[in-house]
Each structure stands twice: as structure tokens, then as C-alpha cells.
Image (cartoon, helix red, strand yellow):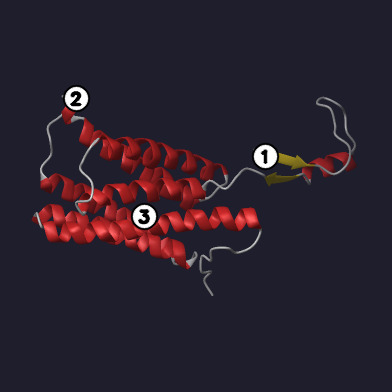
Amino acid sequence: MKHADTAGAAVAPGTPISLRQARAVAATIVRDTSANPAPLGMMGFGLTTILLNLQHVGALRSGSMVLALGIGCGGAAQLVAGVMEWRKKNTFGTVAFVGFGLFWLSLGAMLAAPRLGLGEVGDRSDMAAYLFVWGLFSVVLFVATLKMNRAVMVVFFALTLLFFLLAVADATGSLRIQRVAGWEGIACGLGAIYVGAAQILNEVWGRTILPLGAMD
């Protein structure tokens, strides 16, 4: 939501104004008073990533729970956060949250479509290619985080590594690499939750509760 502060008294629409009033209106300062959407996006990403990778390490069975969370929390929540970042003119936040929101929605569609008779189940090479291109997408975002704080940089580095590890695991059929990727993905998800929690707590308390590691 936007809030406008104007110098001088408010002017009704259609009312003739003086040059001084015109200058005051032209000098209006628009302040963004909307909430920070990044914690929503990071939390949604982190929770879904952890649950998905608990499957990869064999701690959870593949089922509707992860699919539902991926669509609702990973997909919808990140899309909402991305649109809010767009309103704030934050290019990185928009691309990251909308991009990964669409990743979760497309992944959910890939898993659900064969069950609904809308397509055939893909093989490992299909999934490997899918994960690889998302790894390339993550590389671009990781490079951008080099100008941000260290916590976000670590999360996106871990995410980039995760995509490539999962792509290799699918391409080779290696259960060992899949397990390594799973544990790495759980760490990535925990990192994302940390970033989201830090942004919430630091704002609410008005001081640094959880440091994010500002770049020097």
C-alpha cells in the first residue's frame, strides 16, 4: 500500500491551484509502507525444500503431503511474495520468488499430470534436464547475491549446488549422490528459514537478533 505525504493543505480534484501549490504537489514524496514479503518467500521455500529432501534421504515416503505443500507453500506463497517484491521495484526478489514459485508449481504439475491421465511419466533423463536448467537459473541469482548479505549468498550457493547434485543423481541413477543431495538440500532449506526468521525478528525487535552477515 502506498502513502502520500504532501506539503501544504490537500487540494480537491478539479480545484485551480497556485504555482506554489503546484510545486508542493510536484514535490510529493511517496513512501512505501507495505510489509516486507521476503520472509514469506524464504519461509515457503525453506519448508518445502526440507520436506522434499527428507524424501531424498529416505526419511519420508513420496506422497500427497509434499506435493500439496509444494503447490501451496512453495508455489503460491512465493508467487505472492514475488508480486509484492515487484510492487517494491525489487528485481532480484521478483525474479527469485516468482521463478521458484513457478518451479514448485511446474514440479507439482509434472508429478500430478500422469496420475490424472494428462501425460506420461518422464524418465530420469527428463528430470535430470529439468533440474539442470533450474541449476543454471540459480547460478545467475547466486552471482547477484555476491552484492547482498552472506546469509542469502550461502542459501543461493547451496540451492545451486542442490540442483546440480539432483540432476547428476537422476542422470546416473546414483542413490548415494541422491542421499548427499538430500542432506545438502535440508541444510539449504534450514538456511532459508534462518534468513526469513532473521528478517522477521530483526524488524519486530528493532535490532539484530539473528545476524545476516552484511558485506564489508
What's the distance in space between the residues labelled 3 and 1, CA to CA? 33 Å
Dot 1 crowding, Cα within 10 Å, few <14, some 14–19, many 20+: few
Please indicate whether residue 5 sits to the left or right of residue 113 in the image: right
Q: Viewer-proximal residue, 47 or 90?
A: 47
Q: Residue 195: tell me if it is visible.
A: yes
Residue at 26% in and 34% down: 64
Dot 3 crowding, Cα within 10 Å, few <14, some 14–19, many 20+: many
Image coordinates of residue 130 in percent, x first then y, are: 21, 47
Q: Residue 95: tell me if it is visible.
A: no
Residue at 88% in and 41% down: 8
Is residue 103 depicted above or below 11 in this figure? below
Q: How many labels sit on residues?
A: 3
Where does label 2 land, which residue?
116
Q: Viewer-proximal residue, 76 or 55?
A: 55
Q: Are marks 3 and 1 in contact (CB under 8 Å)?
A: no
Q: Earlier in the sequence, mark 3 or mark 2?
A: 2
* Kind of residue at badge 3: Gly
Image coordinates of residue 212 in percent, x first then y, are: 51, 65
Q: Secondary structure at mark 3?
A: helix
Picture disc at residue 181: none
Q: Secondary structure at mark 1?
A: strand
